[in-house]
Image (tube, helix red, strand yellow):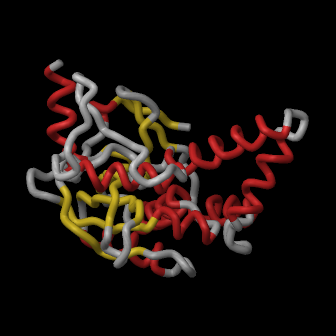
Amino acid sequence: MLKKMVSELSFVNSKSPLPTVEVDSRSIEKAGFSIYRTVMEVLTRLAEEDASMRATIYMYGSVSVNFHEPCWSEFLLVAGPNKVLLALERGFDRLPAVRSRLSDYVPSSAAARTFHIENGMVWEQEDVCTWYSCGKSSSDLDAEIEDAGLAAEPIDEEDEEDDVWEADEADAADEQDEEQALVVAGRRAARYRAARSDAKVSSIRTAIEEVFGLPEGSVALCGPDRRALRGDARIRTLRKRWEES
């Protein structure tokens, strides 16, 4: 494994919003694939083909209706050659039952810097100051994907829950049920990043209820005074109130 300080890498950025590939997180989960592995596979092949290529990929998650219904989406912002954007689009498009598309332009300030191509290698963030590259080839990734069975049958949510149940079968039945639900919900929530500043409070409330299986109207986003914000308020307003409290 190779490591470099942030100052040793030449990240790509832009003052203008960046083009994105949007992936419906739930659809890729149900199909049994991985956003991380798919991105790594695509970027590794690009780095092998052109050692001079330099590109930085940013990510953020948000509620979206771009697939004609509310869902959680991961947006991959591409700062670099257009061929990287198109390669990522093709990489997700070839996955059966996964919903993806070229999508909205998004400022990098709203996202997290996640992947970087430089010197023929793909780099990932280890901590605030350090990035690393495992130096894996595309053949290495192909072998890992095959070993992991990521191209196998789609994951059934009931099967996933059964696995969690079996792992905790020594516990009492009522405790198992509650812990199982929290584990499954936590796995889903871990993939979603900060809500967009221009998102409406009502949209984020609804998304939280859907992800965690909560009753409609049970979630409230409150300011420091513990008063719930109106549904048409923006997330930036909620953040500002807490920052200024």
Which residue lies at the image location 50% right of the left edge and 60% below the top edge? 35
Which residue lies at the image location 80% right of the left edge and 55% below the top edge? 162
Q: Is residue 215 left or right of residue 152?
A: left
Q: Position of residue 129 (x, y in %)?
A: 35, 26
- The residue lying furthest to the right in this view is 170
Towards the viewer: 205 or 47: 205
Quadrant of the image occupied by residue 235: top left
Towards the viewer: 172 or 112: 172
- The residue lying furthest to the left in this view is 15
Q: Is residue 151 above or below residue 3?
A: below
Q: Is residue 186 left or right of residue 217?
A: right
Q: Is residue 244 above or below residue 12?
A: above
Which residue lies at the image location 80% right of the left edge and 52% below the top edge? 163
Q: Position of residue 25 (x, y in %)?
A: 48, 62
Which residue lies at the image location 17% right of the left edge and 52% below the top edge? 232
Check the picture and name the quadrant holding the C terminus. top left
Q: Position of residue 97 (x, y in %)?
A: 55, 79
Q: Position of residue 182 (x, y in %)?
A: 63, 41
Quadrant of the image occupied by residue 16: bottom left
Quadrant of the image occupied by residue 24: bottom left
Towards the viewer: 149 or 195: 195
